[in-house]
Amino acid sequence: MINIAERIIKQMVHDKRSLAMIIIVPLFLLTLLYLLLAKSSYVPVVATENLPASFMTMLEEQDTIRLAVKDVDETIETFLKNGKADAVISQDEEGLRITFVEMDGVKVNAVTDALKSVVSVAAGKSQPETNIDFIYGKKDQSMFDSLGFLLLSVLSFFMIFLFSGISFVRERTSDTLERLMLTPIKTVSVVGGYVLGFGFFAVIQSVLMLIYAKILGMPFVGSWLVAALIMLLLAVLAVVTGVLISAISRNEFQVMQFIPIIIIPQIFFSGLIPVDTLPFKLNYLSKIMPLYYGSEGLKGVLVYGYGFGRVMPQIVILLCFIAAVFAANVFVVERYRA
Amino acid sequence: MIEIDNVSKSFDKTPVLNNISMHIGGSEIVCLLGPSGAGKTTLIRLITGAIKADAGRIRVADINVPSINLYKMIGLMPQNDALYADLTGLENLMFFGGLYDLKGSVLKDRVHEVLTLLDLVHEKDMLVAHYSGGMKKRLSLAMALLHKPKVLLLDEPTVGIEPQLRRTIWAQFHTLRDSGVSMIVSTHVMDEAAKCDRTAILYSGGLMAFDTTENLIAGTTKGNIEELFFMAKEAQL
């Protein structure tokens, strides 16, 4: 027993990268979570409709929200969908109503707290009832319904990353890569072949996941084709990322070690925690994370019902990521020729 | 056909080959003879262009190595089998044949030829993962021969192959040589050197002797190749 423990310790000491990963990665992830889950300083933008003047004056004095002006001709739904505010506070025969685009804890808490403090002063004991509405989703929807789009993007990226990464590292460790690179094949064809080969399975995987998500009742209002396209792009990006990571890893174990660095931070920034209310301006970090664009695109299609045109920016950015990582791959794999 | 001039190579500052020079013509089989760690595999990898020499120059068919133009001309059988274990033998051959632009019936016929030559016809549809060590060696050799290369670099090609088949394979090597193919065969098996036209004795990264195998044997007191090893070791010391 002691012999085995001693052997494992010696092996780890010889593998400096693994040793560093065991020590550094948990600290890195803990720091990232500490920052991401800190109290948000986000100040929601709120518009009003049909509120008494006394309410308006008191709302203006609240420093936890900022007021925006809504055109009277514009419906609350259109106003919010166009991203002009985070919420609209209105009054109707049922009482006060706060309408949000979707459920976002930081925004909902900030706006309801601000409104509560105003109402308690302005209305005294006869406080009107406050209703909360969401344009997308319901108050009582499940986590699966809320984060379904995220699961689709993360799973399509993660599974293909893992398979392509392990497959390519096996190509290296079994020496078939060196043999392959000593044939007349062009490096771009090697990387392209991996994309096509795993892309074939990515198409099947995307379609099956979408069908199954629909069966499980995931909110799905947009085009199947556009959703499948985004998932396919994520999978292609996963292939080239997997190959790149494998090309700089010595074995399967080292490929696995990149998961906490390449995959986990991207999950945090892809909608699991609402990105635009992140503290310390960490939301800017999401701009360099492909999964953020994939999730944004999928959310747009599946939850908001966006068509191809509305998610074109996300698709173009994913294509740029693919092109950049593909080029990096060609450069790295070419090094296997003298 | 193969010109190696003053070639040196180190890995992590440890010298593996030191100032090697050899010229190998067409229609010739040269044996790289030396113990494990002598630098045989490194020399073969340098000729293929898998790694770059630190010093010196290698030319194959008047083309400087490394060059993508040489890959079609060279057939390599690496020391490690370098096969796809999750494909069948036939699928491995069809895949590599395709990389050399062999297509259709030409590819099928050639695959059948090498399978027959290496006695793998009955095992062609088995997954390579289920092959024995000798069968893997034969398949790896079949892959090296597939595209009829002008230069064959074979790193320990007959290890694990039974004597009868080894004899057949060597007969095929001689036929290839007679058809104009240059071959470098690395081995630490003494009697295989006798089947080569010339023998280079490598020891600790140095070229201790390079001459016709007959002349080398004649220079020994006991008249056998084994003694060349001990002479090389003494010369090194």
Image: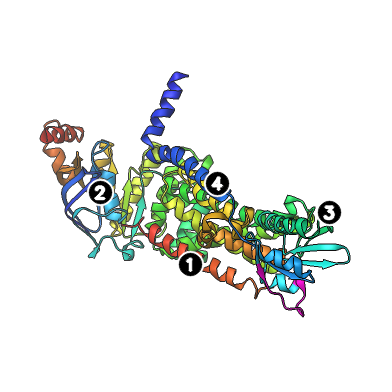
**Which residue type carries mark 1?**
Ala
Q: Chain of mark 1?
A: A
Circle 2 SS class: helix
- Determine if marks 3 and 2 fall on one subunit: no
In 3D space, how far apart are the residues under numbered discs 3 and 1 (Cα atoms)? 63 Å
Whole-percent x and y of residue B71?
35, 61
Residue for point 67% across, 66% down: A60
Mark 1 and mark 2 in contact? Answer it, CB < 8 Å.
no
Identify the residue position indicated by label 1 in the image.
A323
Identify the residue position indicated by label 3 in the image.
A125
Magenta region, residue range: A67-77
- Toward the bottom, the furthest residue is A73
In 3D space, how far apart are the residues under numbered discs 3 and 4 (Cα atoms)? 42 Å
Mark 4 and mark 2 in contact? Answer it, CB < 8 Å.
no
Q: Within 10 Å of the Cα at label 2, are there few (<14), some (14-19), or many (20+) other Cα atoms? A: many
**Mark 3 or mark 4, which has the lower sequence index?**
4
Circle 1 SS class: helix
